[in-house]
Amino acid sequence: MSKHSLSQRSLNTKESQIREASRYCHKFGAINLAQGLPDFPAPEALKEAARDAIAQDHNQYADTWGLEALRVAIAAKMQRDNGISVDPDAQVTVCCGATEGLNIALMSLVDPGDRVLIFEPFYENYIPNLATVGGIAEFVTLQPPQWQISREQLEPIFQKGLKVVIINTPANPTGKVWTRAELQIIADLCQQYDVYVITDEIYEYILYEGEHVCMLSIEGMSDRTIVVNGFSKTFCVTGWRLGYTIACPELTAAMRRIHDFLTICAPAPLQYAALAALNFGRDYYHQMAADYKRKRDLLYPALQQMGLNPVLPRGAYYIWTDCSILAADANAAAYRLAKEAKVAAVPGNCFTNPSQTEVTGLRFCFAKQDSTLEAAVAQMQQVQIT
Ligand code: PMP
């Protein structure tokens, strides 16, 4: 190998602990409630549309901004569900999952040394994504069970100087659904201190209590907000890699320049299928949310009975628990659960400030078949916790 060292950004990026949890899950033959992917099929009509698109030879690069008809359908969805009027030509960009959306948003806004506010517990990708652009994370720790923010808590951080705030609603891993009043606090501070917002709304439709409010709908935020969303969770197709961003024309133009040279376009035939997904009626969304609520209500009482002190999520498909009853730290607790109950969960360190040493949270994913959850519950009930 060359004597030149690898880049600092590659060395600073640690392997995901979720993959690590999946590995020992396999070793113990445990049920995997760690990784956030459903173990049930995608809607038949969607698969049919994808098969048709390939048969019709939509197999070459699509327009780098995204298939025009899909951008028009996304703009229509924004009007219908979020009450926001956006121009599909100038404001909507289809990309390879919300993951690419987050990356092109950060690449467009953040220079090395810029400060970015992240609320913890947070979705684990935010830290490595920020590291690749050289941004510096500023953490605000939210407290269960409400995970509420206040202006008093945030203002000193804005005063220090921030470039971007990342919001995730409904949130992974906490299930927090940001209220309009909380978004208004962020919006006021962003306008006062000239800060951008990246809002990750991938779980928009997986909502049990409260309402989903998009930051773009808050007055004064249209020129300083990038919405990141996608098809992975709503339509059960995490492997299709289809996401999108919505922002004002100037921010969109910046993201499109990067997106074009990063991935060229999202998978072309699957964009045609996504178009079919956006034509699903309200019933689809109601049924999906009701199904996830039933799954939440199946797992939650079992975690309560075990003494894990779970926090009831209002959205998304994860339950956050305290695991101090299992072990002194989250890694040991997750390992013990996988070994003794044969159920894998993700240790909370993945979702907290890397410099925190005393993390006692675990995240369970309930995007699983009822039978998978029932088996996990039965196995956990057999563990003697002393
Ligand atoms: N944001 C959050 C909060 C997520 O939980 C995930 C997936 N786990 C993503 C983004 C990534 O979504 P996509 O599959 O569209 O890249």
Image: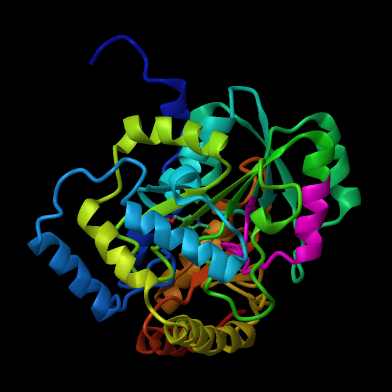
Residue for point 86% across, 56% down: 150
* 240 on left or right of 323: left
Residue for point 26% across, 73% down: 46
Q: Which of the 4 image quarters holds residue 26?
A: bottom left
Residue for point 80% across, 41% down: 191
- Where's residue 312, x and y in %? 65, 78
Q: Is residue 25 magenta?
A: no
Q: Look at the picture and state if 209 lies above or below 184.
A: below
Q: Look at the picture and state if 219 lies above or below 334.
A: above
**Viewer-closest of 299 and 90:** 90
Residue for point 55% across, 59% down: 201
- Where's residue 136, x and y in %? 64, 31
* 285 on left or right of 151: left
* 53 on left or right of 247: left
Q: Which residues are magenta?
A: 167-188
**Viewer-closest of 72 and 121:** 72
Q: Look at the picture and state if 257 lies above or below 79.
A: above
**Viewer-closest of 339 and 188:** 188
- Where's residue 251, x and y in %? 55, 36
| Whether residue 130 is visible | no
The scheme the figure's colours follow is rainbow
Q: Which of the 4 image quarters holds residue 257?
A: top left
Q: Is residue 186 magenta?
A: yes
* 122 on left or right of 64: right
